Image: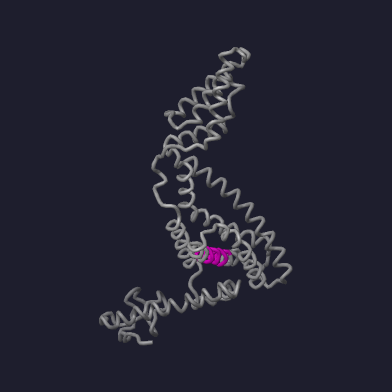
Amino acid sequence: MKTQHLRQNKTCLNCGHPVPDRFCGHCGQENVEVNESFGHLVSHFFQDITHYDSKLLTTLKYLFFYPGLLTKEYIAGKRTSYVNPIRLYVFTSFVFFLMLAMTGEHGDPYNRQAQVIPKLKLDSMVRQAAGLRDSLRRGKVAPEDTAAVRIKADLLTIMGTDSVRNSVRLYDSLQQSLPPHLRKPWWERTIQTRTLELRDRYGGNMRDALENKVLHNYPKLMFLLLPFFALLLKWFFPRKSWMYAHHAIFSIHFHTFIFMTGILAVLINLVLHSNALYVWLMLPLFLYLVFAVRNAYQVQFSTALLKSVGIVAAYALGTAMVGVAFVAILFAFM
């Protein structure tokens, strides 16, 4: 590989420490002449690209075809030949979510649109409200229940049409007019109030706006799930020779493979147009986990299979719980 001429001065230009050879032992900078020709800049550019490409190809080869090997290599200290796992994870996840955004439905989900309620549901709500009011007119409601029936009819009207404005204020006033024992629990009132606020703001786009918020913030959620997955690995494989950071490297490599597979699935789905593809991908991802666990942790296949089932079950449960809390936070503050 053609390189620049070394400087005669053995003092590092970056940190000032002595440089016994080509590279500074303190900061790693190459001690070469600073006056570069244009030809050398071009040559250096292609050398860096080629060097990175070779590392990337080697990393991808081991990631896809040798499950668990990258983790073993990293723990053994063989790291220069491969792309840094965190850097590869960040880049891969960025590309995956970018592709999801580009291939999804276009249009601004935050523009308010008229709410579209299914006709059957709307007709049912209208009939219920009309029936309640008719019962009130005919005196078929006990005096002590009159206020509750009237308020229920008004609530059906509020929920069944998008033309009602200030629905939150109307809902609160209707709840306050009820006797305390007939009011909805505080948590149900909070959810209903927030739903009405978002409906006033986004109309029929309320669901799309929430889904867009979830997709936009999902990478942040993954940063919470990565250490959780590593913690599960530590619980299922309490090896004294492995620190928590080693399990975290396995978690990063496995999730990088998930995102890589997801990128391929998005590209394939541009042709197939079938969301069932993502469901079928669960099986090869699970099998990959089994073989990665078997190779990285040096256990028998039966042990790897059983523990992988336990890890996936615990991970699915934890992901569901964190996901619900995550959506609830977005729902409350969007």
Against 316, residue 187 (above or below) is above
Q: How many marks do you count on the picture?
A: 0
Q: Position of residue 169 (x, y in %)?
A: 45, 26
Res 236 quadrant in image: bottom right
Side (left or right) of 102 relative to 295: left
Please give the range of residues in magenta: 251-263
Question: Viewer-proximal residue, 30 or 198?
Answer: 198
259 is within the stretch colored magenta:
yes
Q: Position of residue 52 (x, y in %)?
A: 43, 76
At horizontal 45% and vertical 65% (from top left) the residue drawn is 91
Side (left or right) of 213 relative to 283: left
**In the rendered image, which quarter contains the N terminus?**
bottom left
Q: Main secondary structure of the magenta part?
A: helix
Q: Is residue 212 above or below residue 143?
A: below
Q: Look at the image and say whether residue 76 sits in the magenta stretch.
A: no
320 versus 140 height, above or below? below
Q: Nearer the viewer, residue 24 or 66?
A: 66
Q: Residue at x 46, y 29 (%)?
A: 168
Reply above or below: 167 against 242.
above
Q: Please name whichever residue, 271 or 197, is drawn nearer the observer in this view of the structure.
A: 271
Q: Where, quadrant-wise, is the C terminus in this rendering?
A: top left
For residue 134, which quarter of the picture?
Answer: top right
| Residue 212 drawn at (x, y percent) | 46, 49
